[in-house]
Image (cartoon, helix red, strand yellow):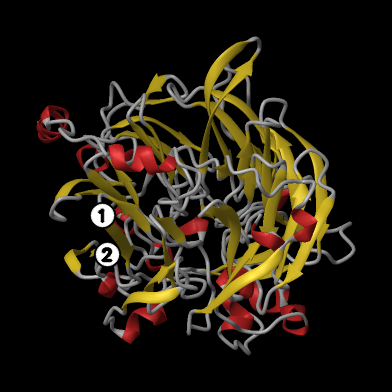
Amino acid sequence: MALVLALASAVMAPTSAVANDDVLRRTADPAQQVLQTVDYANTRYSRLDRINAGNVGQLQVAWTFSTGVLRGHEGSPLVVDGVMYVHTPFPNVVYALDLDNDGRILWKYEPQQDRDVAAIMCCDLVYRGLAYAQGLVFLHQADTTLVALDAKTGAVRWKVANGDPRKGETNTATVMPVKDKLIVGIAGAEFGARGHISAYNIADGTLAWRAYSTGPDAEILLDPQKTTELGKPVGPDSSLKSWEGDQWKIGGGAPWGWFAYDPALNLVYYGSANPGTWNPSQRPGDNKWAMTIFARDADTGVARWVYQMTPHDQWDYDGVNEMILTDQPVDGRMRRLLTHFDRNGFAYTLDRATGELLVAEKFEPGVNWATGVDMDETSPTYGRPILDPKYGTEAEGEDVTYSGICPAAIGAKNQQPAAFSPQTGLFYVPGSALCMDYEPFHVDYAAGQPYVGATLTMYPAPGGEGRTGRFIAWDNVKGRVVWQVPERFSVWSGALATAGGVVFYGTLEGYLKAVDARTGKELYRFRTPSGIVGNVMTYEHRGRQYVAVLSGVGGWAGIGLAAGLADPNAGSGAKDAYAALGSYTALGGQLTVFALPGGR
């Protein structure tokens, strides 16, 4: 009865009376950028074309700005009505810069956060950026405080706590305004925090709905008969039946990645993270719904469909990477597609209206933990990975080292977002080529303390001559790599595709690179002061196109350098995996803005 009442309440909740036409209007204007994802579909495609494959080689630095913070600078600036909004990693400072006056600082917002929150942030003190809607700039601080700032003055309109750091809950992700609500995630799976996605009312910051990743149907906002996985109802207590006892209460599944939204279907899409702990022997079962793609009604939060990519995760293959929404022909008819490049090394193409699985292929050739995904719709294991038991991490129990697993926990691709170009029909994917040794051990849960239960050693994948990075073009319908560019280190920068036939990305050494969208041929490179883990963006101001990127080495790949780690096992195996990085770059925090010469 509790579930029936909860779902009835959600379904009867009034839909948005005032659609967020502001965001739709501004995302339709390529001169501006109001979302980290560029658009609701998460394509990271710009229709600006003044900078193109023929002239991108002439780019010059137009101006720069120092953020004053020396940790991993993920995300990108926003540009709205001639003002650029720049964020920093913890302590999450926000600057408003006047584009008419050489980036003069219009206002600065500096949160007052407890420094202790930095100690419970996994994988560096990063923050993936701001969002804009209805005259407000939205900041989600590391301590989970959600803040709405007046875009003109920087004054706080409202703020609310989305989580509790004492339980290990923190934030690294951006937010997404959808209609009259703000969609917000949480981090903390490595501390046993129970993941949840929330919708806050933009008008006053009050909570509209919240849906957990694990637990009772009423708290996940699942309808046992109407919520489907691969076309079949999930049935009652689908999550509870997949955990032992009350383990779901510390089950992880935090949605700390990206969100997408389809206005026509009114669905929000995102992925959930690893289950807690990393030791699979301690949590028998599929551990639903960690490692899952969710499609939820934006007004009510009720899940339309789900798809669990890595049941009973044994490798920390978080499923939070971006969902990219496209309309493309499949077998002669147009389909509404969702494409997802998972940490586990598989690229998934699904029908975003129904959750039907259309393609599941390896985008990193060295993947060995699974030989493939069962695509036989009549099979009892349809949609599940076909595991290679040699590369599991629990067959011989705890305190055993399982070797040669590919990809490493850091993933064949981590959170750094891919891009899609409607001109080429290709996806442009930053990636990693690392493998790992994995040793699980027993760990007891204590609120606010690490709940990991495994140690890792990561190293370059075989056959790559010591290189650990790739930048690829991917065909999501055929499930194949079209071209690739090898890189010395993992590509930790988000890609940007443009109507000029150019794709931009950054490297851990600090290069901004531009390549031809059709061939991958390098057209331009420039060395910024620090490694790039930010996402390239472009905007237009007074008739001139600019390209901008934050540099400041960090993130999981750069944590050893950014945090000055000495222990070879520190950073969940990343310290030694990227030990050579210190020979190529140094700490920094700078925005670099590029343009063509002569005011073009």
Q: Residue at x 43, y 48 (%)?
A: 272
Left or right: residue 465 versus residue 196 is right
Depth check, front residue: 229 or 18: 18
Identify the element where label 1 is drawn: loop
* Residue 355 pos. (x, y %): 46, 25
Residue at the extreme top of the image, as rendered: 332
Disc 2 marks a residue whose amino acid type is: Lys
- As measured in the structure, the alpha-carbon distance from the residue carrying label 1 to the one carrying label 2 is 8 Å
Q: Residue at x 63, y 31 (%)?
A: 422
When asked about the image quadrant of residue 205, the answer is bottom left
Q: Which residue is mark 2?
A: 152
* Residue 352 pos. (x, y %): 47, 27
| Of the image marks 1 and 2, the number of the one nearer the N terminus | 1
**Mark number, residue 135:** 1
| Pointers 1 and 2 in contact (C-beta within 8 Å) | yes
| Observer able to see residue 402 | no
* Dot 2 alpha-carbon crowd within 10 angstroms: few under 14, some 14 to 19, many 20 or more: few
486 up-or-down from 453: above or below: above
* Residue 455 pos. (x, y %): 59, 72
Identify the element where label 2 is drawn: loop
Depth check, front residue: 203 or 191: 203
Of the 4 image quadrants, the one containing the C terminus is bottom right
* Residue 317 pos. (x, y %): 56, 53
